[in-house]
Amino acid sequence: MKNPFSSGAQTHDKIFTNWAGNQMSTPLRFETPATEDELVSIVRAAAEKGRTVKAVGAGHSFTGIAMTDGILVDLAGYDQVLLVEDNFVTVQAGIRLHALAEHLAAHDLALPNLGDIDVQSVAGAISTGTHGTGLGYQAIAASVAGLRVIDGEGNLHDLQGEDLRIGKVGLGAAGMISTVTLECVPAFWMHAREKGMGVDHVVSVFDEWCETEDHAEFFWVPNTGAALTKRNKRLDSGPGQAGGLKRTMRRLETELTENVAFGAVCRVGSKRPDLVPKVSKIMSMGSSSRDYVAPSWEVFATPRRVKFVEMEYGVPREAWKSAFREVRALLDGIDVPVFFPIEVRAIGADDAAMSMASGRDSVFIAVHQYKGMEYERYFRGVESIMKRHEGRPHWGKMHFRDAEDLAPAYPEMDKFLDLVKRLDAPGTFRNPYLDRVLGQR
């Protein structure tokens, strides 16, 4: 069938494959609703026949969170902006973050924070706890002011109060999201500064940056002492149309360096693991300094066309240096070739029960491996380190943990499970991944 997933997820006959190509399922049927009534009817019909249903947006999760052998609902056509009023926007669940950002910009509004990838659907981003960076800011789900969900029998519910707090990072288990209301902020620009530095220096000043910069992160290049740093300052205004040519040139430079050239380097490294140290050195030398101003949503996100798999953990802010140091030591002693940069960024605490930053300021450490290369020993080694530091895995990124192992990390998991039971008594939205991380229900 025609591929509706513009970000790289694939459908072929009855097979669905995610963007990274590491998750695959064979749904009984694909559905493509455009209205809430159609979405309700799909869930209701499946429930009556005892079938499972999952919704998928961009297919950008690295876990099996959206996989099903039942009914797979493609939200690509369920992506309309329904209402913009004051600082609030209500949208259908399938709208992509980049499309929403452009629409908000036309109304002089913006989301307070975004991650570095913006192809995900809104529902997918908030359901997996997708975040961004900035200790003074929070994950995308913190902006959720209202959720309309369909329960496991096909009934609509508008989540409010405690149910909204508990269910807004819902993992696709606490009902199927129909519409989302988000609280926005006035549109803003950002002054971005990107520069290569020594990683030891960056580690020594990163806590200070988290306090003094609006948004700060760095990428350490394994096998080297180099890191690429990114620091962003929020501005009320920018150069407007006068900066259009510079913005176009910057996008072209980003495409050439971070996709075309980086992709070529990855292909060399994957075919010749013995060259990984040289590849890493080339990558570290290729880090150029950039200083520019652009609309917030253009600065937050970067196109990612080089395929990879990823694991990301959030640890308490005070633990990040120890965790990062142990990851560096792990790479010194492991015989798995790794050249993909390791990302470090901070985010402020929020109150969502299943958010990785729930109740604590957090630093996220993300590790990647080029598509097709060995990753399991590397990722398991990193996960062991993160567990020792009370780490919580990103719900949309790879990890090996189960419900019994995860429960101590989430003090309000029991409340979340109670909400899941109320919204999905028949188990319509279950799948193997959710059974693993939430337990058999």
Image (tube, rainbow, N blue to C red):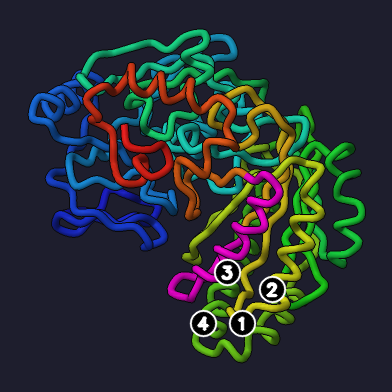
Q: Which mark is residue 378?
A: 3
| 51 to 414, vertically: above or below | below
Residue 369 is inside the magenta segment: yes
3D distance between C-alphas at marks 2 and 4: 17 Å
Answer with left or right where residue 291 lies relative to residue 157.
right
Which residue occupies the foreground of this view, 283 or 344?
344
Magenta stretch bounds = 367-391
- Is 69 included in the stretch rendered in magenta? no
Disc 2 marks a residue whose amino acid type is Leu
Dot 1: element: loop
Q: Quadrant of residue 425?
A: top left
- Residue at point 91%, 61% (across, down): 201
Q: Amino acid at mark 3?
A: Tyr
Instruction: Determine the residue located farthest toward the front in the rendered image.
Output: 404
Q: Which residue is mark 4?
A: 270
Q: Please tell me whether mark 1 or mark 4 is closer to you in this view.
A: 1
Mark 4 surroundings within 10 Å by alpha-carbon count, few (fewer than 14), some (14 through 19), many (20 or more): many
- Under circle 4, the secondary element is helix
**Disc 1 marks which residue?**
335
Residue 173 percent across, percent down from the top left? 36, 31
Q: Amino acid at mark 4?
A: Ser
Q: Give the distance between the C-alpha atoms of the residues marked 4 and 3, in whole angstroms.
A: 15 Å
Dot 2: what SS? helix
